[in-house]
Image (cartoon, coloured by chain):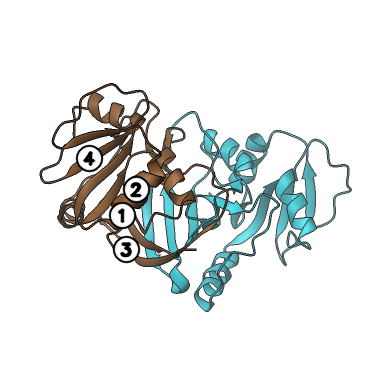
Chain colours: A cyan, B brown
Amino acid sequence: MRKVIFGGAISLDNFIARKDGAVDWLLWSKEVNQIMKDMWKNIDTIVMGRKTYEVAQKMGGGVEQPGVKTYVFSRTIKKRNSKKLTFIADDAAAFVRQLREEEGKDILVMGGGILAQALFEADLVDELGFNIQPILLGSGIPLFYEMSRQIDLELKEGRQLSKGCVYVTYKVKHV
Amino acid sequence: MRKVIFGGAISLDNFIARKDGAVDWLLWSKEVNQIMKDMWKNIDTIVMGRKTYEVAQKMGGGVEQPGVKTYVFSRTIKKRNSKKLTFIADDAAAFVRQLREEEGKDILVMGGGILAQALFEADLVDELGFNIQPILLGSGIPLFYEMSRQIDLELKEGRQLSKGCVYVTYKVKHV
């Protein structure tokens, strides 16, 4: 079965962006580019919520990667589907559960924590990967929302990157 | 000048305890004991808020360490001071600013993020140290509260401990 992966760059206080969606504070390096390149090799599907889609649009796209099919969950967006981009009005967890059972490469959960929360609650997230940036943003778009249960993790890797970043990856211990 | 240090064991979703204060989910190891032993060598003062004090009392003490003076900030607790334990009704930031200028070893900010938030806002925190546990608690007592500004950090150390924990320490870049 393909894996559902949740991750990205975060501040030490667990924000993925400033309140307006800005990610000007992210530190980049060759190592980070390599990590992302390696990750994209194993991804052929992106899932995201409406808010993340809207922020991505505002920031100038980025939701259409070569060789990658993107699903945006929204009951309100009235846009036509394209070859690479499909809008889904159905329940996100049910849709991802089905996607996960199909043949294919891994599925990346992009953006904020609302979609991730629904997928965590349904025990559909398999791996986490975060690049912890050396900053407390103070406020912003949160990575995690409150959940009704705890999720036990197994550390795969934890290491320093350049510029004071720390890269951590985990497997989810399924219920 | 002595340093003000904020830290402790946290879940990956930045909680320091379950909602009732329980820390049954913390993983211990010889390495962690050694890190704590080394840290305590450089500490002679603890500051904490009322809530942390009350949780510590409920859990069976722990606020009175040998050779360490503890200050609890509260406008409501009516208890007598002892040799090791002093209740402070004054503004926490002003009090810690003065403490920090006195001679002595380092000052540890214990417990939840309400006191830390006030000290961060006043630019009085010098170092952070966290033992990130491989768990998403889902809910609990938060480590960080919203702040009016960002705080830039410099990574000192980021390394894997046993049992899937990751230990990170930072210096605060003062304004």
- Nearest the viewer among B169 and B43 is B43
Residue hosting label 2: B96
Q: Secondary structure at mark 1?
A: helix
Q: Amino acid at mark 3?
A: Arg
Q: Amino acid at mark 1?
A: Arg
Residue hosting label 4: B70
- Which of labels 1 and 4 is toward the front? 1
Crowd band around label 3 with a 10 angstrom C-alpha radius: few (<14), some (14–19), many (20+): some
**Residue placed at 88% from the left, 46% from the top?**
A79
* Residue farthest along the bottom direction in this orientation: A30
Q: Is residue A58 left or right of residue B19?
A: right
N-terminal label among 1 and 4: 4
Is A72 rendered above or below residue A84? above
**Residue placed at 38% from the left, 61% from the top?**
A157
Q: Position of residue B78 (x, y in %)?
A: 28, 21
Q: CA distance from mark 4 to mark 2?
A: 12 Å
Is A117 rendered above or below residue A134? above
Residue hosting label 1: B100
* Residue farthest along the left direction in this orientation: B66
Q: Secondary structure at mark 2?
A: helix
Let me know if residue B63 appears in the view: no
Q: Which quadrant of the structure image shows residue A149?
A: top left
Q: Position of residue A8 (x, y in %)?
A: 56, 57
- Badge 3: chain ID: B
Q: Secondary structure at mark 4?
A: strand
Are both tags, 1 and 3, on one chain?
yes
- Badge 1: chain ID: B
Residue hosting label 3: B159
Q: Are marks 2 and 3 in contact (CB under 8 Å)?
A: no
Q: Position of residue B87 (x, y in %)?
A: 27, 32
Q: Are marks 1 and 2 in contact (CB under 8 Å)?
A: yes
